[in-house]
Image: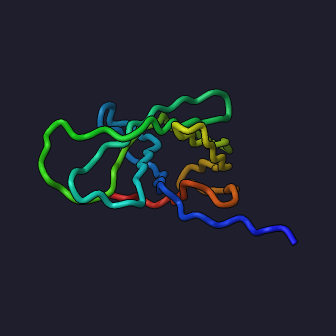
Amino acid sequence: MPRKKKLRAPEYRLNLFYGLSEQTKDNAVMVLVQTTQVFVNFNYEILLHSEIKERRITIHIRGLHAPSLVLPAMGPARGKLELPLVRGRYALVIRKLQREINEFQVEFLPKQIRVQESPENPFITITTNNAD
């Protein structure tokens, strides 16, 4: 009898929602990535990079960065991106440093964002709620 794969808890949570760009003041797709682990010493920053090609949005998680102002603080590590406004169905690919990948199918509608497909046992979970 084959063994069942052990389910692991997600390491990250991603909030995907529409908002106003802080830089351009135009509508944008906001991406907030947080660790599920709470850090007790510092509020670490998650280094993120994104690229959009055709119908594919790739977000690279490039690691954690200690804050430049070293004051004690408690909370998850966070990273934020602003993406240009897109419409239609896109593959949303999340890549970790260890080359692990999760791919989701996301539909960007005029008034809402819907997650259509998710991988089994992902390292990151997605919600379309505004996190702030």
96 in relation to 24, above or below: below
Residue farthest to the bottom?
A: 1
Which sits in the foreground, 9 or 92? 9
Indicate the quadrant containing the N terminus: top left, top right, bottom left or bottom right.
bottom right
Residue 82, x across and y down, in percent: 41, 38
Residue at figure coordinates x 21%, y 54% from the top left: 41
Residue 26 drawn at (x, y percent): 38, 36
Res. 73 image quadrant: bottom left
Q: Residue at x 24, y 59 (%)?
A: 40
The reply, left or right, for residue 122 in relation to residue 35 is right
Q: Residue furthest right?
A: 1
Residue 107 locus on image (x, y percent): 64, 50
Q: How is the image coloured?
A: rainbow
- Specify the quadrant that holds the C terminus: bottom left
- Using the image, determine if residue 9 lies above or below residue 22: below
> In the rendered view, would you say 111 is above or below 20?
below
Say which quarter of the image contains residue 7: bottom right
Residue at (38% x, 60% y) in the render: 37
48 or 39: nearer the viewer: 39
User: In the rendered view, does 42 fall on the left or right side of 107?
Assistant: left
Q: Quadrant of residue 126?
A: bottom right
Horizontal and vertical percent for residue 59? 53, 37
Residue appearing at x 42%, y 60% in the figure: 36
Taking the image as shown, residue 41 lies to the left or right of residue 71, namely right
Viewer-side residue, 120 vs 128:
120
Number of marks in picture: 0
